Image (cartoon, helix red, strand yellow):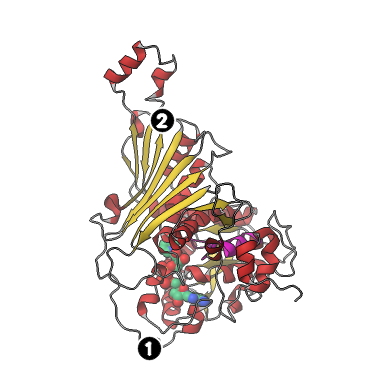
Amino acid sequence: MKNPVTRRQFLENGTMAAGAAAVTAALGGCGTAGTGMTFGPAPATRVSRRTVSPNEKFNITLVGCGGMGRYKLGNFMDSKQCNVVALCDVDDKQLAGAAEDAAKKLNQKPELIKDYRQVVTRKDIDLVIVATPDHWHAAPMMLAVASGKDVYCEKPCCHNIHEGRLMVNAAKKYGAVVQVGTHQREIPHIQEAREFIRAGKLGTISMTNTYTYGNEVFANMGNDPDGPVPPGVNYDMWLGAARVLPFNKRRFHNTWRWYFDYGCGMVGDWNVHLQDIIMWTMGAVSPISVSCVGGHFIIEDDRTTPDMMQAVYEFPAPQDAPTSKQGFIQTYTMRKVSGKPWDVGGYGMDFHGTNGMIHLTRNDYVTDPDKWDWKFWDGVKKQGRIGPNQSEWRTGNMTKEQKNRNFPGADQAAHQKHVEDFLACVRDRKPPLANLESHYYSVAACHLANVSLRVGRRVYWDGTRELCFTDRELRIPDREANKYLAREYRKGFELPVV
Ligand SMILES: NC(=O)c1ccc[n+]([C@@H]2O[C@H](COP(=O)([O-])OP(=O)(O)OC[C@H]3O[C@@H](n4cnc5c(N)ncnc54)[C@H](O)[C@@H]3O)[C@@H](O)[C@H]2O)c1
């Protein structure tokens, strides 16, 4: 290749737009080399796709048959619109578990396959569910869409911002319908609160907060030594692009999410759901800056992601809704080993407007209108500093009915609806509610908190060039921060060129 650009040069100096192909080569052949792909809307490329008539069932496969994969497979089977044709996992035990589910629910006997490439390219498959650990979302998803499949991909869609952008471009290029697992968007009371806020009824919003408190024990995953790879596991394939480390059950099923090699910690794992509702409601796309502090304060195991984190985002005024006029501040607070059980104050989202605040969880919708401090406001009134409409201002349109409502079961119902919404969109060739691109921006914001944490300073974000800067004017690229926008892919596990 002429004038090779190294990954480092790209990330230090280049722009994403100029560098898509260059980074491809530099990262060892991954990405978009030779496709001429740019960062505007990519032209749809013709790909053969089976037309599934309204009475016909979809042929589906699940890649990643762990906790969430099996749960989602259950949703797809319960839709009564799917045949499970094949299952894919690198662990025989996981495959057997999912096969049992398909036998029980549908009396079907899917083929069990350990290499995703043999599954997502199959002609007889219409839809692919990707529920692997985060570091294994991009490759199967990209190969699937390039093979004419539509994809339900678990959240967070990507392990790093750069591969997320490649995924968005691939979906656009092949005209694929891609829904991501941020199912909270389907919850009716969250939608209702969103409409209320976007209609301006909460007033002007200047601050939003999300938080997750884990009710966990100090020792947590423990510190057992490394051990042998369990029988029936293709560990090399499980590691994929990540560096090779000896096997340890802490860095394997389920708890991989606390290691940066495979996941992104609590901010990308759980806060992505909450951050997504904040940004989707506010009409926010990219932050101006992100500042994050955190580290290991309490938990005693060897995780690489923090057990305590405080992120502060500055967002510009959104274009598409009157939610905030001058922009707003979003904070994310994460604290493990708290005394709060998950469903009793363990997580939540708050919107603070000039009329009051709204607090949301998957089960609650609580409004708290601002109250008049009569003494103070009478004084202000007397001084003539209050206009005719302003007397309405403090209580706005926040009505009594919206106070303290509980919706048990909303979460589960939303999981099912999210899948059925996806299937309807596949039939109609429409973008689903949590379509990949809009989800990508929420995930990018989550990843940026980790970037700021890892460099130990505030980063300024250019949402157009998708690069970090050290200054608000976006003149000086933040070389150190930009290194965290992508990863090194282990030889043989580069992203597919699609
Ligand atoms: N939407 C939600 O509410 C929600 C909830 C939990 C998890 N998730 C997401 O679902 C995904 C899976 O999480 P989990 O908790 O089920 O993890 P898990 O560890 O239980 O399951 C992951 C499975 O993927 C398999 N796998 C790993 N590499 C593979 C490969 N190359 N090919 C095929 N299979 C491979 C593993 O063997 C394992 O069985 C994650 O991205 C997670 O963030 C979403």
Q: CA distance from mark 1 to mark 2?
A: 58 Å
**Whether residue 331 is situated above or below residue 179 in the rendered picture:** above
Q: Secondary structure at mark 1?
A: loop
As drawn, the label of residue 354 is 2
Q: Nearer the viewer, residue 54 or 218?
A: 218
Residue at 37% across / 25% down in the picture? Answer: 395
Going by the numbered disc 1, the residue's amino acid type is: Pro
Residue at 50% across / 32% down in the picture? Answer: 199
Q: Nearer the viewer, mark 1 or mark 2?
A: 2
Q: Position of residue 227 (x, y in %)?
A: 35, 86
Quadrant of the rendered structure where residue 490 is?
A: bottom right
Q: Nearer the viewer, residue 9 or 114?
A: 9
- 476 in the magenta segment: no
Q: Secondary structure at mark 2?
A: loop
Q: Position of residue 467 (x, y in %)?
A: 59, 57
* Label 1 Cα crowd, 10 Å radius (few <14 / some 14-19 / many 20+): few
- 157 in the magenta segment: yes
**How many numbered circles are shown?**
2
Q: Is residue 430 left or right of residue 260?
A: right
Q: Nearer the viewer, residue 273 or 433?
A: 273
Quadrant of the rendered structure where residue 296 is?
A: bottom left
From the Cβ of disc 2, is ligand 1 less than 8 Å away? no
Q: Position of residue 469 (x, y in %)?
A: 56, 54
- Does residue 224 appear in this view? yes
Q: Which residue is mark 1?
A: 228
Quadrant of the rendered structure where residue 53 is?
A: bottom right
Going by the numbered disc 2, the residue's amino acid type is: Thr
Residue range in magenta is: 153-169
Q: Residue lying furthest left in this view?
A: 339
Name the N-terminal-most of marks 1 and 2: 1
